[in-house]
Image: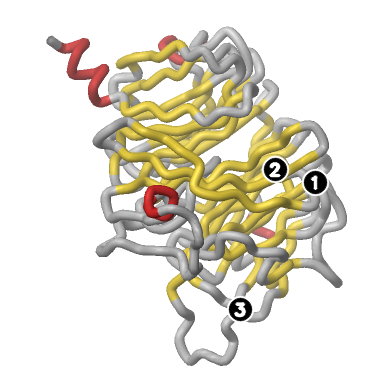
């Protein structure tokens, strides 16, 4: 998750540029140099990553200084269970006494347990989440994917291994919609980028589901015929859904025509499975794979623009910085975050 506001970078990204220098509200007793490391500047990118190390799980907040290509850990938060899905929330709905929801930096965390936790990233050492989505009508198994509504920040879609998809309202902390007609675990969820009530999801039986949250009877199921590992939509080509497979190929589903395609340029995109796909406003599709390679495609021409072979072994969840369309980040199997601004490589390639 990449953002220029306070804390976030992990698997998905949202955020806006900070207008001023921010500091955490702690009286630090370290040296001036150490105190300086806690300061968040308007030029900084913030990144939130979920990390698993042996039996320990945590959220790590990174600062990325674009000018110097410098990445360092700002602070971390210990978790009771392994993180599976992350989202960034720009306000604190736990402040119920306020007439207006205050601006804040919160991490929404889906884990191997059924609960969804919301953590305050503006605190250096929080001991517990500010809110937990659980209880009656909540998920009963691991939460596999999260998607915050692109317009309505109080709505969150969650997918689970319990074969259900739910929509939560943060103003009540309760689910307001539940779809339970999946045959296998729901593995991915996204909101449509041009129709605010439409949701896309896919499940373990390799079916893509499209439905309108206003009607449970509106669902369309598409049997894909291959093992889906990831999917995403584009802010430019909003009628297309891109699906990454376990054999390293990328497929495109056209919502208007109802056709599933595998363009030649995407047929052998990678040698191994594609755990994550990202898109940006430049009309680019960025894929990262268990083969350690990141590739950038032009969606319109269906051509490969550039690729980057990393030393990070397998690559996992990814995101694009909302303030810099070419700044890409993803997790890796060696416990390190990969950050790549591919603008420089594209310029070098064209010269």
Q: Upstream in the sequence, badge 1 or badge 2? A: 2
Q: Upstream in the sequence, badge 3 or badge 1? A: 3
- Checking the image for residue 316, the label placed there is none
Q: Mark 3 falls on what kind of element? A: loop
Seen from this angle, which residue lies furthest left? 351
Residue position for label 1: 112
Identify the residue at horizontal 42%, vertical 55% (top origin): 35
Distance of label 1 from label 2 (alpha carbons)? 7 Å
Asked if marks 2 and 3 touch (Cβ < 8 Å), the reply is no
145 or 67: nearer the viewer: 67
Residue position for label 2: 84
214 or 338: nearer the viewer: 338
Asked if marks 3 and 1 touch (Cβ < 8 Å), the reply is no
Q: Mark 2 falls on what kind of element? A: strand
Relative to 194, 334 lies left or right? right
Identify the residue at horizontal 31%, vertical 33% (top origin): 326
Identify the residue at horizontal 80%, vertical 55% (top origin): 180
Identify the residue at horizontal 73%, vertical 51% (top origin): 79
**x, y percentage for residue 314?**
61, 18
Quadrant (top left/top right/bottom left/bottom right) for the C terminus: top left
Q: Upstream in the sequence, badge 2 or badge 3? A: 2
**x, y percentage for residue 109?**
66, 54
Residue position for label 3: 94
Q: Quadrant of residue 136?
A: bottom right
Asked if marks 1 and 2 touch (Cβ < 8 Å), the reply is yes
CA neighbours of label 3 inside 10 A, class few (<14), some (14 to 19), many (20+): some
């Amino acid at each position: 998750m990449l953002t220029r506001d306070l804390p976030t970078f992990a698997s998905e990204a949202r955020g806006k540029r900070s207008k001023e220098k921010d500091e955490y509200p702690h009286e630090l007793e370290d040296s001036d140099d150490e105190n300086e490391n806690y300061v968040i500047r308007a030029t900084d990118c913030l990144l939130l990553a979920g990390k698993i190390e042996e039996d320990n799980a945590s959220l790590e907040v990174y600062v990325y200084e674009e000018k110097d290509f410098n990445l360092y850990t700002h602070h971390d938060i210990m978790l009771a269970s392994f993180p599976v899905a992350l989202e960034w929330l720009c306000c604190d709905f736990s402040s119920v006494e306020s007439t207006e929801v205050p601006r804040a930096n919160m991490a929404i965390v889906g884990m191997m347990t059924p609960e969804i936790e919301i953590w305050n990233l503006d605190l250096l050492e929080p001991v517990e989440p500010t809110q937990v989505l659980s209880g009656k009508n909540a998920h009963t198994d691991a939460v596999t994917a999260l998607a915050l509504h692109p317009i309505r920040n109080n709505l969150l879609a969650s997918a689970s291994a319990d074969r259900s998809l739910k929509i939560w309202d943060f103003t009540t902390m309760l689910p307001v919609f539940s779809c339970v007609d999946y045959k296998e675990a729901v593995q991915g969820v996204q909101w449509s980028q041009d129709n605010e009530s439409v949701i896309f999801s896919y499940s373990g039986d390799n079916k893509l589901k499209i439905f309108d949250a206003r009607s449970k009877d509106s669902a369309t199921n598409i049997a894909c015929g291959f093992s889906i590992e990831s999917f995403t939509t584009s802010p430019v080509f909003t009628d297309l859904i891109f699906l990454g497979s376990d054999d390293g190929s990328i497929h495109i589903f056209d919502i208007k025509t109802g056709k599933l395609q595998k363009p030649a340029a995407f047929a052998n995109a990678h040698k191994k499975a594609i755990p994550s796909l990202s898109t940006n406003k430049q009309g680019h599709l960025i894929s990262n794979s268990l083969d350690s390679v990141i590739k950038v495609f032009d969606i319109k021409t269906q051509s490969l623009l550039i690729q980057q072979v990393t030393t990070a072994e397998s690559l996992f969840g990814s995101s694009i910085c909302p303030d810099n369309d070419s700044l890409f980040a993803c997790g890796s199997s060696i416990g390190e975050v990969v950050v790549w601004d591919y603008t420089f490589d594209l310029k070098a390639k064209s010269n």
